[in-house]
Amino acid sequence: MDEFSFIDKLKKLFAGIGDETILGIGDDCAVVPVSADESFVVTTDMLVEGVHFLEGGISPRELGGKSLAVNLSDVAAMGARPVASFLSVALPADKRGGWAEEFARGYSDMSARFDVKPAGGDTTSSKGGVAINVTVVGRAPNKNLKYRSGARVGDVVAVTGFLGISAAANFINEIVPQVAEGAWLGERQEVGAMMDLSDGLAGDLVHILRASGVGAEVELTKIPTSHPLELALAGGEDYKLLLTASADGFEALAADYRERFESELYPVGRIIAGIPEIVWLENGMRLLRDFRGFDHFVIHITRLTNTTDGDAVQLIVIIL
Ligand code: ADP
Ligand code: MG
């Protein structure tokens, strides 16, 4: 059973339990309404040594910052503002001295940078490696909340920055979550769906398509990247925002965004009616790609290009 089928199983098993006004499993954050006008959003993420990071691959200070940053990114993805965090750590004996202090410094610096209150947590020992769990609570006016289910046919699909940078560098340790950008986009009624890019555009966009019951066309030549396309689409750990916006409002939205952040909203495609799959286009020509996800060593891409006298099949294998 893979990660997503397990989550689906949990979602079915937990359905119907408790307060039905709480939005649970399936979006970047859970949404807990506090009044008719406002909600708390809550997200939690776990980082495990040997799985998410390797000893020596990241400094404890960077790890402290990153463990909070990935959660701030999920809060931003809802159009909300992060307010408080909870930090739980399991530490082996050799990590309880200077290592722990450096880790705490990184966590504290990231908290201060985005003005998020470290409000509690739990500390325990570990007989194995380090395990870290961070929970972040945010808040937003209900009208600002952006769900994965908010995409509508005709919407522009856009991303907030260059993709593939982290994967090309064999994963960067310093993540800058788009906290102000997310809250700002939340206030804009042109924005339909939003999520953060943690697993790569190719996989992440499908979550929006499934939740919204729509398809999408993505134009490969519009993907903002200076790295091989495979890294931009399936590399992961981008921590940029992926959003859909009404076609007639997009230009004004992008202009205001540019003025506010001196940065671009990059349109990469549009939402279409149909099954929740991505139709890849290259200069308007339809391609058929088979993504196996990101493999550190070998990426196989099956590519079907349209020609005037029928379909030609071309197999490209890139070995990095
Ligand atoms: P993200 O990458 O945005 O953090 P995930 O892919 O980790 O999201 O999780 C997708 C959804 O599944 C989220 O709503 C999350 O809360 C939920 N989820 C993941 N694991 C569990 C679990 N063990 N129990 C309950 N919900 C879970
Ligand atoms: Mg997310």
Image: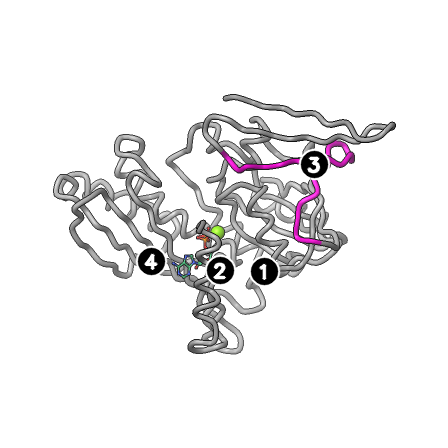
Of circles 3 and 4, the one toward us is 3
Q: CA distance from mark 4 to mark 1?
A: 23 Å
Q: Quadrant of residue 217?
A: top right
Q: Is residue 111 left or right of residue 128?
A: right
Image: 151 above or below 33: above
Of circles 2 and 1, the one toward us is 2
Which span is picked out in magenta? 275-294
The residue sitting at the front extreme is: 1
Query: Are circles 4 and 2 on residues that touch, CB within 8 Å?
Result: no
Q: Which residue is mark 4?
A: 85
SS category of the residue bearing label 3: strand
Q: Is residue 281 magenta?
A: yes
Q: Which residue is mark 1?
A: 187
Q: Which residue is mark 3?
A: 288
Q: Local crowd at mark 3 within 10 Å, few (<14), some, or many (≥20)?
A: some
Q: Earlier in the sequence, mark 3 or mark 4?
A: 4
Viewer-nearest residue: 108 or 56: 56
Q: Which residue is mark 2?
A: 8
Q: Is residue 50 left or right of residue 258?
A: left
